[in-house]
Image (spheres, helix red, strand yellow):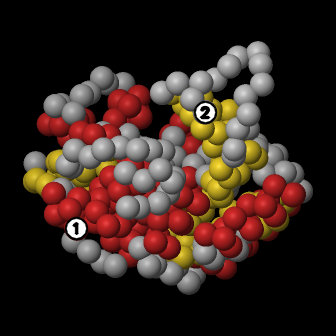
Amino acid sequence: MILTVTMNPSIDTRYTIDHLVVDDVNRVVPQKTAGGKGLNVSRVLCQLGDDVIATGLLGGHMGAFLADRMDDDGIPHDFVSIEGESRICIAVIHDGAQTEFLESGPTVSADELVRFDAKFNELVGTASCVTISGSLPAGIDVDYYVKLVEAAHAAGVPVLVDTSGASLDAILNAPVKPTLIKPNLSEICGLLGANYTPDDVAELEGLLASDERFAGISWVVVTMGAAGAVAFHDGRGYRVVTPAIKAVNATGSGDSTVAGFAHAIAAGMDDEDVLRWGNTCGKLNAMDPQTGHLVMSEWDSVFNSIEVKRL
């Protein structure tokens, strides 16, 4: 079973209109899904046929709505209920652009977090892999993911972390490391104080190897959008070149990539197949208008077109 963690899920609401009229009425037809990075991971894993349990925190009427949407999507879930209302995030697609309104989410009490600690420790013991994705709601310290990584490590379970900012800094500076992190090129440049492009792979490899914060992380995968990815696994470096596609909706492609990695790592695949599965899932999500959903009819075409080269 693959366990996915989403501490700050949201009702993702999408409005698509030709033109946004400011300071006037815009009539829309909403599309509402169970959102949050970890739930996108869950949705893709279900599509891949994995045994999945999604966990995290759900609050109030919005949390009940999210649980219903997970049921609709066929995502097995075991969340901890909290008093505060789960958040709503709105994306307006208009004029060839996307404008987003993202609520911060509820404030979590110490007692609620203790209950989630117990839930996670219960579930991780039955997991073959864990993914931890996204932001933390208010009331939770930025180093909380370190605690979850330590629990997964103690259980002997590989753990993949996809977060950013202070939470990622805490992960990198902790003594117990995750199995995989997946910063994008912009995030890794911020961490390293550099300004790399996809052509600077050799320099990136050298700096990562010399930075003690990355020591002990088995997989460091740096995604670069249409330029593919560069990955480092236990001293081996890889350049991943992906095929050109017609992208319809790139939202959730990073989460889909994590799902592919989790599927492959849980199955014990070799390095090249781990990278092919992850990058194929990311590409197939971008080809589908639904977030966290793959165009499976194009699987063979995309999978067989991905090149994985040793550095």
Q: Residue at x 33, y 52 (%)?
A: 283
Viewer-closest of 165 and 49: 49
The dot on residue 203 is: none
Most distant residue in the bottom direction: 126
Q: Amino acid at mark 2?
A: Ile
Q: In the picture provided, is 140 more to the left or to the right than 133?
A: right
Q: Residue at x 32, y 40 (%)?
A: 225
Most distant residue in the top direction: 23
Q: Earlier in the sequence, mark 2 or mark 1?
A: 2
The residue tagged with tag 2: helix, strand or loop?
loop
**In this figure, which residue is indicated by the disc labeled 2?**
17
The dot on residue 300 is: 1
Can you give x and y, in whole percent of width and height, for residue 95 in the image? Answer: 52, 24
What's the distance in space between the residues labelled 2 and 1, CA to CA?
34 Å
Q: Is residue 161 visible?
A: no
Q: In the picture provided, is 175 more to the left or to the right than 91?
A: left
Most distant residue in the left direction: 310
Can you give x and y, in whole percent of width and height, for residue 21 in the image? Answer: 68, 19
Q: Amino acid at mark 1?
A: Asp
The image shows residue 305, relative to residue 75, as above or below, that is above
Q: In the picture provided, is 180 more to the left or to the right than 63?
A: left
Badge 2 density bin: few <14, some 14–19, many ≥20, Cα 10 Å: some
Q: Residue at x 10, y 48 (%)?
A: 311
Can you give x and y, in whole percent of width and height, for residue 220 in the image? Answer: 32, 51
The image shows residue 285, relative to residue 101, as above or below, that is below
Tag 2 near tag 1, CB within 8 Å: no
Viewer-closest of 307 and 81: 307
The image shows residue 186, relative to residue 63, as above or below, that is above
The image shows residue 120, relative to residue 275, as above or below, that is below
The residue tagged with tag 1: helix, strand or loop?
helix
